[in-house]
Image (cartoon, rainbow, N blue to C red):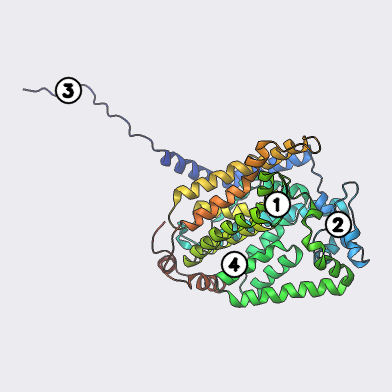
Amino acid sequence: MATRPTGPIHRSAPAVKPSDVLAAVRRRALDHARWLLLLSLAAHAVVLAVAPPDPFDLRVYWEASPQVLSGRLYDFRLAPSGLPFTYPPFAAVVFLPLSYVPWPVAVVGWHLLSLGALTVIVVCAGRLLPETAGMGHRGLGRDRVMLWVAGCLWLEPVRHTLDLGQVNLVLTALVLWGLAAAKEAGAVGAAVGVAAGVKLTPAVSGVHLLLTRQWKAAVAACVVFVGTLALGWSVAPRESVRYWRSLVVEPERVGPVVSVRNQSLRGAVGRALGHDVGFEAPWLLAALVVAALAGYAAWVAARRADLLGALVAVQLTGLLLVPISWSHHWVWCVPAMIWLLYGPGRGRTQRLAAFAAWAIATAGRVVPQLNHVEAALPAGAPAPTQLAVVGWVYAVCALLTLVAIATAGTGTGGTGAAATAEERRSGPVDGRAASAALDTEGP
């Protein structure tokens, strides 16, 4: 006859899953989001105090903009660097009030404006996510927004934009505000048109309007953009002719195309081959492949009524295909990373791989490190392998993101994106109805 054990029974503790650990860390971070944001901002302030940046791009805006009234805008060179003013005349008109502000006030004010723009970017990118993203409401929520702002403050494109006093964050915020928060189609188009009038690259947002069938907003964007041309012409007719006839097609004027700081496809291919390929066969072949992948990715996102996915696909394609995309132009990595974590559809592995690539490349400041290597080379010396291979870093991150969007799967209809855009401007929608309309496959 068997006897029962008389001592205490020891049961092995259940195994702890990595997903449970990550969930616990995420909950703790959300619970302390406000303090983490304050800590990040305090560290940012300390860095600025210890090593104040030289916002020479802001100084170009500040010093050059009055020249639009004298007709010598494109003769301007910032001493001692020799940097020119590279935007359309309308941009100088927009920056003109800045020139009447004392320089220290302009620096502080612009920095605070850019920090506010980063917050707008995070909030509006979250609002463009489908409600099927799993938050149970439209947008990221206050705590997630604070965490994202705290973290994104240390990504290289964001920090570089802040250090230079660049306009990237402001224009990206303007576009996203128009697409996510503006109530009328005219306001959406106006936001896109003004952003494109200041710096031509945001004009690619018009493709997103067409892709998502926001016809009225697309027309408004065209009208407003033409209005910016007319205003620039009325203020500086000779400089307008000079810019649109010749300067706009001279990328070398703003810097060397094959510099590692240029993360466009043309820069990456040029570094791989050892010279600027221009728009010749190597670039054309690479551009066709990228355009095909991006077109399919944007179409997939539009079919899912995934406005953020479609927008990210369009914007990353624009950054890849223009002749020059300095590393600070890539602030669109923020909406891209938000989509990669919260976007709908299949392909979680692809999304996490792309997110990890962005996090390593931007938080690890890969491009500035490569720039130090490049700057140390003797004049005329061949570029080392790491500049040709690792120098593809942002282009590779963009391609991984496009693959993730393309493999996320499609939804039920081709009109969902336009309907969703209209619903976002007209007010809240029922979460269950949106879920049924936007996602037939599940995340």
Residue 204 lies left or right of residue 54; in this view the side is left
Q: Residue at x 47, y 67 (%)?
A: 303
Q: SS of the residue at dot 2?
A: helix
Q: Amino acid at mark 1?
A: Val
Q: Amino acid at mark 4?
A: His
Residue 154 lies left or right of residue 439; in this view the side is right
399 w.r.t. 40: above or below: below
First in residue order: circle 3 vs circle 4: 3
Q: Amino acid at mark 2?
A: Trp
Residue 100 visible in image: no
Q: Residue furthest front?
A: 281
First in residue order: circle 1 vs circle 4: 4
Q: Nearer the viewer, mark 3 or mark 1?
A: 1
95 w.r.t. 421: above or below: above
Q: CA distance from mark 2 to mark 4?
A: 32 Å
Q: Are marks 1 and 4 in contact (CB under 8 Å)?
A: no
Q: Are marks 3 and 2 in contact (CB under 8 Å)?
A: no
Q: Position of residue 394 (x, y in %)?
A: 63, 48
The numbered mark at residue 339 is none
Residue 234 visible in image: yes
Q: Nearer the viewer, residue 9 or 309?
A: 309
